[in-house]
Every structure is written in structure tokens, then in C-alpha cells.
Image (spheres, rainbow, N blue to C red):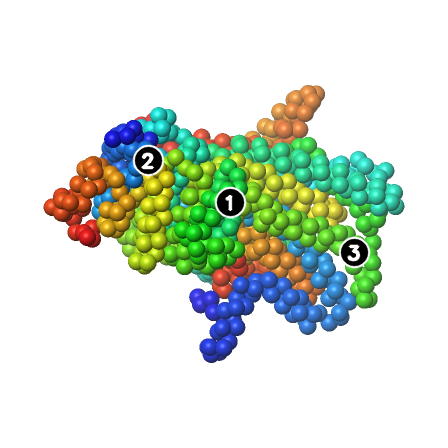
Amino acid sequence: MPDPILRLEGVFTDIAQYHILQGVDLEVPAGQVTMLLGRNGVGKTTTLRTIMGLWRARAGAITFDGRDITALPTPAIARAGIGFVPEDMGIFHDLSVEENMMLAAVSGPIAGDRLEAIFSAFPPLKTFWNSEAGNLSGGQKQMLSIARVMAEERRLYLIDEPTKGLAPAIIATMARALKDLRAQGASILLVEQNFSVAKMLGDRCAVMDDGRIVWTGAMDELARDEALQERLMGLSMEAA
Amino acid sequence: MLRRLISGDTPRSTVLSIVLLVILIALAFAPFLFPGTRSVDTAARVCIFIALVASYDLMLGYGGIVSFAHTMFFGMGAYGVALASIHMGRGFDALLVGSVAGALAAAALAFVIGLFSLRVRAIFFAMITLAVASAVAVLVSQLSSITGGEDGLNYKIPRALTSAHKFMDDKLFGVRINGKLANYYLVFFGSLILFLILLRIVNSPFGRVLQAIRENDFRAEAIGYRAVYYRTSATCISATVAALAGSLYAIWLRYVGPDTTLSFEIMIDILLMVVIGGMGTLYGAVIGATIFVVAQNYLQNLMGIAEAALGDLPVIPLFLNPDRWLLWLGVLFVLSVYFFPTGVVGRLRRRV
Amino acid sequence: MSIAPEHAPTMETAGLWHRLEPYVPILLIPALVIVGFLAIPTSSSWLTLTVSGLAMGMMIFIMASGLTLVFGLMDVINFGHGAFVSVGAFVGITILLSLGGMTDAPSLVLNLSALLLAVFGAMLATAAMGWAFEKVIIQPVYGAHLKQILITMGGLIIVEQLILVAWGPDEIFLTRPETFKGAITFAGAAIEKYRLVAVGVGLVVFLAMRWVLRSTRIGLIVRAGVENGEMVEALGYRLRLVFVAVFIAGSALAGLGGVMWGLYQEVITAHMGASIMVLVFIVVIIGGLGSVEGCFIGALLVGLLQNYIAFLAPKFALISNIGLMVVILMWRPQGMVPVVKAK
């Protein structure tokens, strides 16, 4: 297994009086796709938000590329090279597609070939380049949220349920784009409920339950073992 | 018996209990302990402001709602009594009609404002009350044919409440037993009853839900309490009590005017009294109002003396001018909100 | 409360309404002007009132714009905003009075440079004050609305009192620079020159603000931050710095508004900022908290209505704005141009 680019050690996060994360230990290897799986409400989204510093860990340490980022402010974490796609996509509805993309390119204008690659992965974005993002369809918004994170090269991508509520055709587009990203050697931590997508994209996999990581291993191993799936994730996972 | 009277809400601190008891005794026997027009006047103001500030605390401390219209409600009660006394002639019936009308009008207006602003977001309420209260204050000063404008209104109250009426020819402990004394006790018991009613309300299930909403309105809604309903009700109760306190004030002063009831300065005074005494505990209102009114009446003199004494120094006297009283209160206010938001009462309770 | 108007529910009108809906707030301004024309007996008075209504609206907009953006960005409501208006007025007018030689001369160039110096001084002072206010008063109470309201109100009292200490308790009367005195006559209506200046300055500020918000990177960050501050931070922008910048800019604009308001009223008092805040709050509420466009439209509506009613029924001018607020909140509880919040 390659060196981890991100490591969480004993991370606890509280939201109001609720203890959501109860000692998360997780390693995300560089250049691979790590799937974060588990039933609803076990703390997957909280894990991603804690990494980004949007919610603060009460205890534990988060190390990114050998550097302790636990206490860094969110913008500094982002600028360290982490791209984040939140569960609600975080699209700016009042801004045009172009303006959304411009904002995402923090260090300067988007390189021409990179933009071409984005357009070929998500053709609707080119069509609606000057429209308000609020007028896009749900699938197009999701494309924009992924495209935004691809506006610049990041060292790690945190993506929260990119296929949630999308039509199968758009899921396929999304999966293809993520596969391309992976082919370029990106490190990705991906929360995904759609098991067939997870199977296709994942190299490794971590399963959460009750605020902890309860199983880690190769994606293949989990995909082969239906009894294990059942035990770890119960019925909410649509086993393929 | 006593516990029931205060709705089981004990002061929970020995020092606080003693202080409250001293204040209660001092106010109950003020005409005998501190004879003299000015000191009895101060005592009456303390009584009225305790009820007024306590009613404000129901909103601010218990409901977590900031209102800038409390003087407007206070003024409605006062103008109610004044207008009734003028148009119905002097008499207890006029006082009663005026008080009830003022209280009902205040409750109705509070209901409308609450409905409008509280259902959107609580901060709307602060801004809207500020706007409405200012507009009403301007309107009152402009409709001088009805309200007397800036000059206010003078009117007659029943003779039995004025010093012209003597109940006994002899003095009791050196104090004349006249209508003025009766008027003081009307104010004292009126304020006491209003205070005890408020104490009852905050310790009722209603009061507890209100506090739950203040802590976490999201969760309270989830359990099934309509936050808007509770907040609007608290606003209405608070406005009613404020109006009744205003009626007492009008009866005591035999005069109403924008400066004594509606002005923004009084609104600031109320805020200061709540914060200094301690938000979220009605005993804070007692402490805050007492400290403040007494200080206002006597400390300003002290500032004047200090200013005169330091008259030769540069700049400093400017800050000690009695007119700069509000500057020091402002500083005190900001510091209290930062460093001891639970006020004097919170401090006293923590020591136990 | 239904948002739809009392139209006959046919498909055609519904479609037309749907297309018109985004423009309804802006169309309210000409609608109010027309109502004013019908209600006011002579057209010359109507013209005079309309211009002064627009002038007043522009000045209120200048004072209110910072407040609404500050709220939109960080959910901070500054009840002490009026303090910047007062301080701006006192600093600006003091500078102007000290430049008596330049303001009394009947030369547009001299007058204008005196005015610019005064405005510059006032904005500089209020910008510095805004920076300090944000650091000392507001920073410790982020996220706590109740404390914010109380603390900023306390800040307002302190600043007002400090003005009294520095400038004395009396109100200061002033006259406008020579070339801005008097009125011009247009179509039989006397229009004060200064009001035209105020309208011009207001328009410039509004257009400049729109340009910054729409065409610069910082404007992009501000607009995105109003909608979803968390995401802006997750992209790597330090929203706090942007917020401080907006707070300072908003304070400077309040200072500008203070100078202009002082010249409009020809008298300044320590309490003027607090009094004007009543109208400012009405404007930001009916405009939609956080929306600059809504604030602009709201300010013009308030200014026009205030002037029309002051002519028709003088005693009810201020209360009429409360009426306007009630009507608009019944129609749109979040204000005319509601700001979409991510959460």
C-alpha cells in the first residue's frame, strides 16, 4: 500500500451535544480512490467536513501530506491542496456557471486545455456557460460541482455523494469523469451510496458505523463478499 | 406560603436573598424610612421600573427576543390613563378605563408586530420594533391636539390619591397620612403584584417552553412547540405588563410626556437595568432597577461635584460632566454584556 | 400569505406575471411616482417632491448599503451603524467649516474641492473607526445575535457621547458651499441644486458598487459569500478578511452618507445617525437583508413616499414608511429581493 496522503487518528467531532465521530482512524493512500461507505447517519459527511475544518475535531489529529492540519482554518486547508465537493454541491446559484468556475480557480485563470477537458467531460457546462447556475438542472449542478473541483489540480479530492438523486445516464457521466480523474493519478476520498459506482471506482474502501471506521480493505474484497456487505452496511446499500 | 407567592423561584443565594429582602423592606416602608418628596419619588420610580424591567426581561432574558418598543408599550399605558382622566374627568373609573384600554392596545400592537416579524427571523423583531417605536414617538409629538405634543399632558387624578386629601389629622411616625401616601402604596402594591404575576409566568410550563425555545428553537419546534406562538405570546404579556406599569407611572406623576415615557433614553435605561441586574432572572430586574434609579438620582450629583473639583484639569472634566452620564452607562453596558452577561444576580449565585 | 397577486388565474396572465415577477420590485418605483403624480395637485410640486424623494432615497441607500452587505456576508447585524453616519457628518462638516474660504467663493472648482476634501476626510475617519469597531465590538460576538444587538447598541451610545465630548452638546448649523446653494427652475418646479448633486452621487455609488460586485474578483467572492460563506472558505478564500474589508467600506459609505445628510439638513447633531437608522432599517428589511439591489429599490421607495406624504399629510410621513414596510412584508416576508441562503 502506498504512503497515505491523509491520515486521521482518533478523531472525535461533536455537533451541538451529539457525539458524531467517535474516534475515526483512517488512511487515504496517495494516487488511489478510497471509498467511504456506510449507512446513513454514521458520520461520513461529518468526516469530510471535519477534514475541511468546517466542523472542528474535539480530539484527534488530521495529517495531510505529513503536515498537521487539525487546527488550520478552512481556507488554509483548501489551499494546502484539498478540493471539496459537499453533499449539497455548494453551487453559488446567483452566479453564472463561468463565475462559479472562476471562483474555483483560486490561483489564477483556468488553463485552456484543462477547460477543454472539463467541457468534453461535461458538455452542458459549455452550453450554459453564461447562465445563472441556479437555473441548471440537478444533474447539471452536480456536473458543475465536480467541474469546479477540477478547475485546478488538487492533491486530494473529497467528494460527498456525487451521484445522489441523479438519473442513470448522468451517473454514468459522473462515474466516467471520476474515472478519468483517477486515471490521472489523483488521490480521492469518495463517499458513495451507489454500490455499483463504488465497485467500479474504488481501489480501497473504508466502512463506517456509529462514528467509527469498522472495516478497511481492498474494494474487491468487499465486492466479492456479500455476507460481509450485509453485515457492515445492512440493507440500505443496494447490493449489485 | 411565601414559596407559593414567589412561585417556588427562590433567589438561590444567601446574599441575594438578603439584598432582595432589604430592597423589599426599604420600598415597603420608604415613606417612613426616607421621608421627603424626592426620596419617596425615587422609591416610587424604583417600584415602577422593577415591574417594567421585569416585563422586559420576560422577552429578552427568557424569550431571547430583543425589542426596542418597550417604552412604546409603557407609554401606551401612561397615555391611556392621561387621556381617560382628561376626557372622562378625574375619577378612579377613568384610571381603570385608561389602564385597561392602554394595556389592551399595547397587547394588540405587540401581537401584530410579533406576528409580522417573529415568523421570519428574530432579528427582524429588533429592527422593526425600533422603527415602529420611533415612528410612534414622532407621531405622538406631532399630534399635539390629542397628545399634548412635546409638552405632554397634565391631568387630575382622584383627590384620594393626592396630598390634598388627609386621612388622619395626626402624623404617624412623623409622616402625614394623606392621599400621596395612598398613591405610593398603590404604586408599590401594583408593581409588586405585576412582578409576582411575571414570576408566576416564567415558572409555569409556558415559561419553561419559552426558555427551551431560546436555547434551541429548532429542537423546540421539533418536539412540537410553535416558537412563533410562544414568542408572540411572551411579547404580548410583556407589553401588557409594561403598559400597566406605565399606567402606574402616569398615576404617580400626574403628567405624561414623550420624555418621561416614550423616549429612546428610557429604552436604553431599561436595557441597562436588565443587563446590569442579570438577564433571564426576574430578580435581576429588582437589583438592576434599584441600582440604576438610585444611581441616576444621586450619582449624577456626584459627577457634578467631581467635575467642579477637577475643573482645572484639561479634558477630564468634559468626561465627568453630569450630562455625560450616558457615556459611562454605555461603557458599563458593553463591559457587562461581554464580561458578565448573567449580571449581578448571576455573580451572586455563582459564589454559592 | 400568498405571493401571487390578485390576478384572474388564467394561463395567459399567469405566464405574463411569471415573466414580470423578477422586475416587480424595480417597477414599484415608477408606480409610486405615478401614484404621486395623481395624488399631488400641481405637477410642479410633484416634480420638486420627486427629485427630493430621489435625493433622500439615494442618501439612505448610501448609508444602508454597507449594513445590508455586512449582514449578508457574516450574519452580523450592526445596530451601531448610525454612529458612523454621525461621526462622518461631524468630521466632514468640521473640515468643510474650516475651509470657509473655499466654500464661500462662488467657484465651482473651489467648492467642489472643499467638498471632496471633506468627504475624503469623513470617509477616512469612518473607515478607520469601522476597522476598530469590527475588531473591538463585533469580533467577540460573532454568531450571537442577541449579544450583537446589545453590544452594537452600546457602541452607538458610547460614540454618540464621545461626539458630544469632542464637539460640545450643541447642534451645529451650516450652509452649503456657494455653488450648491439655491435652486434651478425646471418646468415651473424649483429644484434645489444640492438635491441633484445628491441624486448624482447616489447613482455613482450604486453603479460603482454594482460594477465591483459583478465584475471584480472580490465582488464575486462577496456575492458568493452572501449565498454560501462556508463554500467560499472551502474553496480557499479567507472570508473573514473579505468581511472586514466590506465592513470598512460600508462604514466609509456611512460616513459619506453622513456628510451628505448633514449638508441636506443643514444641521448636524450627535443623534442624527441614530435617527436616520430608523429609515435605514426599514430600507434593509423591505429590500431583503443582504441584497444591494433590494436596498437600492427600498431606499428610493422610502425616500419618495416620505416626501409625497410629507406634502399630503405632514404628520404621517414617518408612519407611512412603517405602512410601506407592513405591506411589503405581507407580500414578501423576506423582503422584495430575498437573498437565497444555502442553509
The single residue placed furthest to the left in the displayed view is: A227
Relative to B181, residue B92 above or below: below
Q: Position of residue C321 (x, y in %)?
A: 59, 59
Question: Viewer-nearest of labels 3 and 2?
Answer: 2
Residue depicted at 33% across the width and 58% down the height: A169
Q: CA distance from mark 3 to mark 2?
A: 71 Å
Identify the residue position indicated by label 3 in the image. Answer: C192
Residue at (46, 44) in percent of width and height: A114
Q: Which mark is residue C327?
A: none
Between marks 3 and 1 in the image, the one whose residue lies nearer the viewer: 1
Residue B225 position by quadrant = bottom left
Q: Nearer the viewer, residue C270 or C187?
A: C187
- Cα distance, mark 2 to mark 1? 24 Å
Q: Are marks 3 and 1 on the same chain?
A: no
Question: Which residue occupies 63% across, 36% down?
Answer: C127
Residue matched to label 2: A31
Asked whether residue A92 is in view, the answer is yes
For the residue labelled by badge 2, is the local secondary structure a helix, a strand or a loop? loop
Mark 1 packing: few (<14 Cα in 10 Å), some, or many (20+)?
Answer: few
Q: Chain of mark 3?
A: C
Q: Residues within 10 Å of mark 3 (few under 14, many from 20)?
A: some
Q: Are marks 3 and 2 in contact (CB under 8 Å)?
A: no
With C324 as the anchor, is C185 left or right in this view? right
Quarter holding residue B306: top right
| Image quarter in which the N terminus of chain B is found | top left
Q: Which residue is mark 1?
A: A112
Helix, strand or loop at mark 1: helix
Does the CB distance between marks 3 and 1 fall below 8 Å?
Answer: no
The amino acid on which the numbered mark 3 sits, given as a three-letter code, is Glu
Density class for disc 2 (Cα within 10 Å; few <14, some 14-19, many ≥20) is: many
